[in-house]
Image (spheres, rainbow, N blue to C red):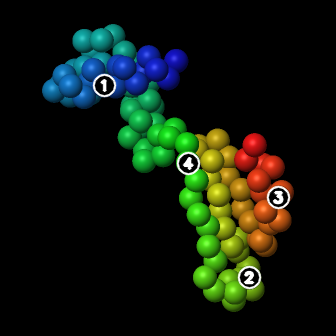
Amino acid sequence: MEPHYRQVYRRWQSSGLTVVTFCQQESIKYATFRYWAKKFEQPDNGVPGFTELRLSRPSIMTSFGPIAVLRVGTQATLHLYELPDPAWLGSLLL
C-alpha cells in the first residue's frame, strides 16, 4: 500500500494545490493523506542504514537513565542501560 500513497504524495507535491483541494479532487480522506504524508516527510523514511554509537565518557555508565536509545523506524525502541555484548547486538539486527 505504501508505494500507492508515495505516488499520490508525489502527485500532490507537483500539483501546486493545497492538501485540502488535492484530497477533494482525488477523493482521498484528508486524515489518510496526512497520515502517509507525515511518514514520507520524516527524515527516517525507510532508508536502511546504521548509525555508529560511541560513548565518549565512561562516567555515563553511572547515570540512572539509559546510556543509549536505539529506534528502529517507527516500529521499535531499545533502551540500553549497559553496554551490550556486540555479538548479541549483531544477532538482533539479522
Kindly report the distance in space between the C-alpha atoms of the residues bearing marks 3 and 2: 20 Å
Q: How many marks?
A: 4
- Whether residue 50 appears in this view of the structure is yes
* Amino acid found under the numbered disc labelled 1: Arg
Which is in the foreground here, disc 2 or disc 4?
4
Kindly report the distance in space between the C-alpha atoms of the residues bearing marks 2 and 4: 26 Å
Kindly report the distance in space between the C-alpha atoms of the residues bearing marks 1 and 4: 24 Å
Pointer 1 local density, CA inside 10 Å: few below 14, some 14–19, many at least 20: few
Picture coordinates of residue 1, whole percent (x, y):
52, 18
- Whether residue 20 appears in this view of the structure is no
Residue under numbered circle 1: 10
* Mark 4 element type: loop
Q: Name the disc covering residue 46, or none.
A: none
Looking at this view, is 19 or 2 the one in front? 2
Of the residues under marks 4 and 3, which one precedes in the sequence? 4
Q: Name the disc covering residue 87, or none.
A: 3
* Mark 2 element type: helix
* Amino acid found under the numbered disc labelled 3: Ala
Which is in the foreground here, disc 1 or disc 4?
4
Which is in the foreground here, disc 3 or disc 2?
3
Residue under numbered circle 2: 61
Of the residues under marks 2 and 1, which one precedes in the sequence? 1
